[in-house]
Structure formats: C-alpha cells, structure tokens
Amino acid sequence: MGYTKSAIKGVSWMSGLRMTNRALTFVKIAVLARLLTPAEFGIFGIATLLLSFLQILTETGLNVVLIQSQKQIEEYLDSAWILSILRGAFIFLIILLSAPFVASFFNTPASLNIILLIGLSPLIKGFINPAEVRFQKNLTFNYEFLFRTTLYFTDAAVAIIAALITHSVYSLAFGLLAGSILEVILSFTVVKPLPKLKFNNNYLKEIFHKGKWVTAYGIFNYFSENGDNIVVGKVLGATTLGLYQMAYKVSYIPISEISDVANIVIFPVFSKIDQDKKRLISAFWKSTGVISFLTIIAGGIIFLFPKEVITVILGQQWVSAAPVLRVLSIYGIIRAAMGPSSAMFLALEKQRYVTFMIFVRFITLIITIYPLVIYFGMVGAGYSALLSSLTEFPIILYFIYKISKGR
C-alpha cells in the first residue's frame, strides 16, 4: 500500500498547523517581549526548567508505543489513562516539594510562586484522553490541525490578554493553564473512545517495556537541550537566561517550523513501511534532503541578519542576544537535518539508537558547557550546544549503515 499521498496530505495539514502555531507564537512573543522584561522571561524559564525536567523524567513513551503498535488503541486506553493520571499527580507533588530548593538554587525568590502555579498544569493534563494520539496513528492530520490550533490560540490569547491587564510574568502561566484545561475538555468531547478507570497489568508491562528507551532518551535529551539553560541561569543570572532562551526561540522557530512538521508526519509513515528496509531508507534520505535544503534557507537568513531579526520580532531591548542568535541558527539547521533519523529509528522500534545518540550529545554538552560559558559568556552556551549536535552526526551514520545492511 502506498503512503505517499497520505504523507503529502499529512505534511500539508501539519504545515498549516505549524504555520498557525508559529504565527500565534510570533504574536505572543512580540507582544509580551514589549510588556515584560528579559528578567521576567528568565524567571518563567527557570520555572519551566523544573516542569519540563519532571515531565521528561516520568515520560512513559506512551504515544510512541501507541503509534508503533499494530494493535488497536482501545486495548491500551484504560491502562494508559490511569498511568497518565498517576504521572500528573506525581509531577505536581514533586513540584510542590522541590519549588523552594529550585528558587534558591537559581537565587531567584520571585520564581517560587510561578513554579507552584505552573505545577498545576501536569496535574490537569494527566486527565487527558490518551485516544487523541489516534489522529497521528491513523494519519488523520486534519483533525490534529483543528485540535491543536484551538489549544495554541487559547494559550496565546489568554497570555496576551493577561499581560495587557497585569504586565506580569504570571500571564505566561495563565496561558499555559488555560491550554491545559481546554485540552482535557476537548479530549473528552471530540475524541472517542473514552477511557475508563480500569487497567490491564499486561498492557502496563508492555508500555513500560517498550517505553523505557523513550524515557531514557527523554532524560538525556532534556539535559542536552536544557543543560545550557541551567548553567546560564546559575552562572549569568535570570536576565541573561531570558535573553538566551529568547534567542533560542527566535532561531529555532522558523527552522523547527519545517523539521517538526515533517517529523510528525514521517514517523507514522515510516512505521507503516518499516518491513521494507530498502523503501524505508530511500524515504529517509529523501526526507532528509528536503528538510536540510529548506532549513538552510531559513537558518541562513537568521545567521546573516541577527540584529534585524531580533529588532523586528522582539524590539530593541533584546538586541544584545544577536551574537548568540547567529550561533544558534547553525545549531538549529544541524538539529533539523538530523530529525528524520530519530523518526526512522523509532519507527523500527530502535529506541536504544535514539537514546545513545542523545547520550553522546549530553556528554559533549556536560564537558564543554561550563568552561565555554565562563570564557565566552552567553555565546559560549551556544557554542556548547553546537558542538554537542555535531558529535551526533557520525553516530547517526553508523546506525543507518547497520540498518541498511540488515544488522
């Protein structure tokens, strides 16, 4: 059965979704960057560092397992929902207990209340109906488009309205919580079937067995993605962290616009042709070529005109982030080009490959981040991120070689 037509439709819908999401994100950032200071963005960034770490630490790989499996979602649904609820409650509890220590570590007492407030998000999202993953599994990306666009719009609208009224960093948290609440509501009103409070121990074991590599991947990926943020926030302070994180967003938004759309679509497509290795490898190289070409164009514009890009999007108060923006644009291009490899490895249930790739990137970052930040400041964090992504490249080529040889 050919999936080219489905893939093209999927890319079209997901491109529309990403364009809509990025447009909303652009408006949200452009407005908030003029209402809030870099220090306030840094405070929110510190809060989200803890939240994202706990989400990754407790990641079960559920969605990946549901997409990979040839079984119907209904067989896993009830067990998956209970697992999701327990995970959300656990994250919320840990945030309550650890928030004072995190605020103290970064020497930012103002971040304490923000950390506690956004801690409600995982508790709420734990009740989301896991069946919403069937939009991707069944390649019905038109429904995914409508579903996600509604959530993105709600998050952005609430955050902007709250910021216009309060001029407070809490507006970012309000947007996050509004999106979380709406997702739970929509997952039970527009997604079928509905889960029940019962579980099958065998299905839980299968989820944990297949998802353990996804969990390990997530942990290493978190530190490889956020190790620079942690060091910048600790060594250089909340204001510099706000500048660095905003530069990262500006550099990665147009690039991930291309790569993330493609990867969302090609993962389930690759999963459906995983038995035909020759066809899979061919599809992988075609995807990589197209993504690389497009991201070089997007990243090249940011690299050549960093000050102009920052001034237009964020305003003059953020222009000191221009040097690191240039470095991060190269990092974004490399990461985007490597994206299809992870999708292919996951489609083949080679989660350990992806985990090892991220582990290598993580080790490189750990070794280089502190001395480079001390010596080069904020730009040094960008250099460390760039070096860490380059070390993945030979690992990816080796794993592709193994797959092509049937090993």
Image (cartoon, grey):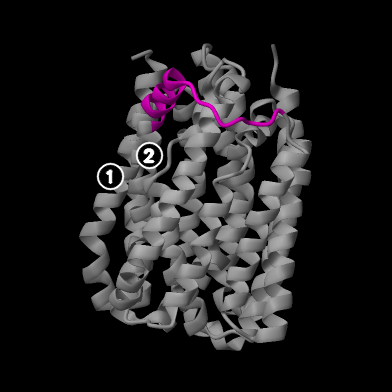
Q: Give the camera-side residue of 291 and 201.
A: 201
Label 2: state its secondary structure: helix
Extreme-front residue of the structure:
197
Q: Is residue 315 above or below residue 12?
A: below
Three-letter code, disc 1:
Val
Label tally? 2
Whole-number angstrom distance, CA of label 1 to CA of label 2: 16 Å
User: Can residue 383 be found in the magenta stretch?
Assistant: no
Q: Quadrant of the N terminus?
A: top right
Three-letter code, disc 2:
Thr
Residue 206 falls left or right of residue 18: left
Q: Toward which corner of the image does residue 271 lie, by quadrant?
A: top right
User: Can residue 208 be found in the magenta stretch?
Assistant: yes
Q: Give the camera-side residue of 94 and 402.
A: 94
Residue 79 on image: x %, y %:
51, 28
Residue under label 2, please give it. 215
Residue 367 falls left or right of residue 244: left
Is any atom of residue 63 visible in this view?
no
Residue 327 on image: x %, y %:
43, 66
Magenta extent: 193-211
Camera-near label (1 vs 2) is: 2
Q: Give the camera-side residue of 324 and 241.
A: 241
Q: Quadrant of the C terminus?
A: top left
Which residue occupies 38% across, 82% down? 109
Label 1: state its secondary structure: helix
Which residue occupies 56% across, 79% down? 169
Q: How busy is the neighbourhood of tag 2: few (under 14 within 10 Å), some, or many (20 plus)? A: many
Residue 101 on image: x %, y %:
30, 71
Q: How busy is the neighbourhood of tag 1: few (under 14 within 10 Å), some, or many (20 plus)? A: some
Which residue occupies 45% across, 73% down? 244
Instruction: Give the label on residue 360, or none.
Output: 1
